[in-house]
Amino acid sequence: MPSSPEACPRGCGDTPSFPASWGCQPSQVPQLVQGHTTGVPREGPGWMKTEVEPGRAGHPLRSSCADEKLGIFQDDGDVSVGELLALGGAGGFQAACDQYHKGIISGSICQDLCNLHKVEWRTCLSSVPGQQVYSGLWQGKEVTIKCGIEESLNSKAGSDSAPRRELVLFDKPTRGTSIKEFREMTLGFLKANLGDLPSLPALVGQVLLMADFNQDSRVSLAEAKSMWALLQRNEFLLLLSLQEKEHASRLLGYCGDLYVTEGAPHGSWHGAALPPLLRPLLPPALHSALQQWLGPAWPWRAKIAIGLLEFVEELFHGSYGTFYMCETTLANVGYTAKYDFKMADLQQVAPEAAVRRFLQGRHCEHSSDCTYGRDCRAPCDKLMRQCKGDLIQPNLAKVCELLRDYLLPGAPADLHAELGRQLRTCTTLSGLASQVEAHHSLVLSHLKTLLWKKISNTKYS
């Protein structure tokens, strides 16, 4: 039986409640207990949903994909993804596995998740309310499980900083929709979100191929509903668009609007990702020392930085358009055991078409009114009182600001001055269209070359 979650951080379901033995106080919430007959039967005899009497023993736990609080009562206290999903419905409605058993949704991991219980549920990885992200184990591999994620690009930046997606009801497409209509429906959605690109029919083909996970050469209504719900998830759409890129996590499977990716890379760059409120309190020398002590050795940091710069290239005029990083922090990036860069969280990456549609013509008094997510900001035309379409600061300039703090401390003496000069040049880049093409490519190429020369032909390359 899989092990129970290790902690009860805020964010994986607003206010999660775990047994006292897990370090948190149990709360009076609905439970699954043996011997009661109200609710939907579960695996094994007598498993029903009912209200727990005050003081009654149980193992309360915030469900994975539910807005309501549900719980588990089982002698060993172990929790699997299958057990949790049988409790909480995606988007706060019916349980995902219940929906699967009723034929409403489908997916490549539904069988392992709901019938065979081969997916193990481990630790909550999110600290943001509404974002439910967990580590897990599936088919002997470390995986990341994501579900029930609110779609504001930045819940901390205010309710109108980015559009929210509708709750997932699994109501589209409707019965009677032909495969041709679903193809056109998908193409229209992708055009609206990625722009009118000649490569989109190929992406539609990928969507249909993924929907037909059992390879029976047809797409059932449940498969189509699940894929349509997944497309509403910003990160899933990004993962699908960047599947051929080495710096994005690989999609492994899905069930309804829950999806599984490769295991989370090593967390935020230790030392560099100190809490913002703490940084001003630390002397610069101590801050630099912490980065060097807690983070990888400088050559490894250089290798990770090269990967991040390559990722910026991948986001710029890729096969499916340009994407913007709209919360550029070290907490959103990671690296593998071999120190290859991996983007840990694509939630804050947005298609150019979506950002422009949100910003262009928006009423403003100041440029701060023209913000998508946390830091995708456009100029405000104060005469017209409308936001313009071009961003003030491109991806590369924002990334170079991060790299300045990450790479300069501990940099080799013979490299320090030139690296500092190139990073300063990079941070002054503008997002205006007249600058973007050749100039950005040149600056990025120079930076990569400078770093690569220093670590090539060594054990760090």
Image (tube, rainbow, N blue to C red):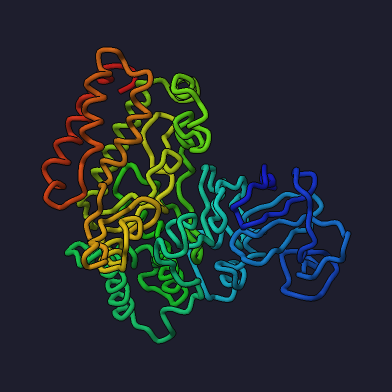
Above or below residue 349? Residue 414 is: above
Q: Is residue 105 left or right of residue 38?
A: left
Compared across the picture, whether 184 is left or right of 268 comes to left
Give the residue at the far front of this rendering: 383
Q: Nearer the viewer, residue 47 or 64?
A: 64
* Horizontal relation, residue 377 to residue 294: left or right: left
Residue 316: percent from left, percent from top: 22, 49
Residue depicted at 25% across the width and 50% down the height: 392
Q: Is residue 338 above or below residue 380?
A: above
Depth check: give the residue in front, 314 or 104: 314
Q: What is the total number of numbered labels drawn onto the structure image?
A: 0
Compared to residue 434, the image places residue 386 above or below, namely below
Q: Residue at x 72, y 54 (%)?
A: 17
Can residue 451 be seen? no
Instruction: State the image coordinates of residue 382 (x, y, percent, origin top left).
Output: 24, 62
* Quarter of the image that includes the C terminus: top left
Whether residue 287 can be seen here: yes
The residue sitting at 53% across, 52% down in the picture is: 145
Q: Is residue 450 above or below residue 336?
A: above
Among all residues in the image, which is located at the extreme top? 413
Q: Provide residue 420's location: percent of width, then percent of height.
A: 26, 25
Q: Residue furthest bottom?
A: 176
Q: Which is nearer the eye, 141 or 385?
A: 385
Point 61% across, 49% down: residue = 120
Residue 94: give x, y in percent of width and height.
Answer: 61, 72
Quadrant in the picture for residue 368: bottom left
